[in-house]
Image: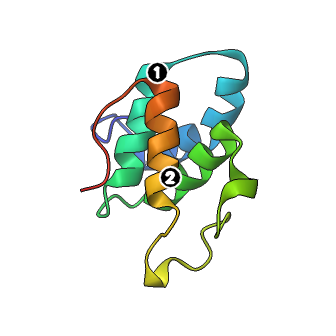
Amino acid sequence: MSPTDLGWMNSRMSAIHLAKDYFKDFRDDELGCELVAIFCNPSDQDQLSARGTLVDILGIRDELGDPFGLELEAGDTDAGYIVKMARQRFNCHGGLH
C-alpha cells in the first residue's frame, strides 16, 4: 500500500478495500497501522476508504454516530474512537493530531 509502488493509485485503493477480507484470516499489525496512518492523514486521498475499512475490520459500525461517514463536512466526530480502537487492535502508535 505504499504510495511509491508502481501503479499505486489503483492497487493501493484496491488493497484498502480488500483489507477487510484479508483480516478475516490473518493478523497483520503492520498493515493495520498503515490503515490508521492513512486515515489520520487529512491530505491522503484514500482517507475515507481507510476509515470505512477500519470500521469494518473492527466491527464497530453500530457504535458510531456516523457509521458510514456520510456527514463528514462538519468533522468526523467518530474519528477519535476509530483511531483508539484500531491502535489497540493493531498495537500501533500515532494518530490524530
Q: Image quarter for residue 31? A: top left
Residue 45: percent from the left, percent from the top?
39, 61
Residue drawn at point x = 61 percent, y = 34 percent = 19
**85 or 20, nearer to the observer:** 85
Which one is in front in this view, the residue at disc 2 or the one at disc 1?
A: 2
Q: How is the image coloured?
A: rainbow
Residue 59 in the figure: left or right of residue 38: right
Residue 21 in the figure: left or right of residue 13: right
Q: Which residue is mark 1?
A: 29
Residue 95: percent from the left, percent from the top?
32, 46
Is the C terminus in the top left, top right, bottom left or bottom right quadrant? bottom left
Q: Earlier in the sequence, mark 2 or mark 1?
A: 1
Residue drawn at point x = 57 percent, y = 44 percent = 54
- Which amino acid, mark 1? Asp
Residue 13 in the figure: left or right of residue 40: right
Residue drawn at point x = 27 percent, y = 39 percent = 94
Distance, label 2 to label 1, CA atoms, is: 18 Å
Which secondary structure, mark 1?
helix
Q: Which residue is mark 2?
A: 81
Q: Image quarter for residue 5? A: top left
Residue drawn at point x = 71 percent, y = 31 percent = 21
Residue 30: percent from the left, percent from the top?
41, 22
- 27 vs 47: above or below: above
Which secondary structure, mark 2?
helix
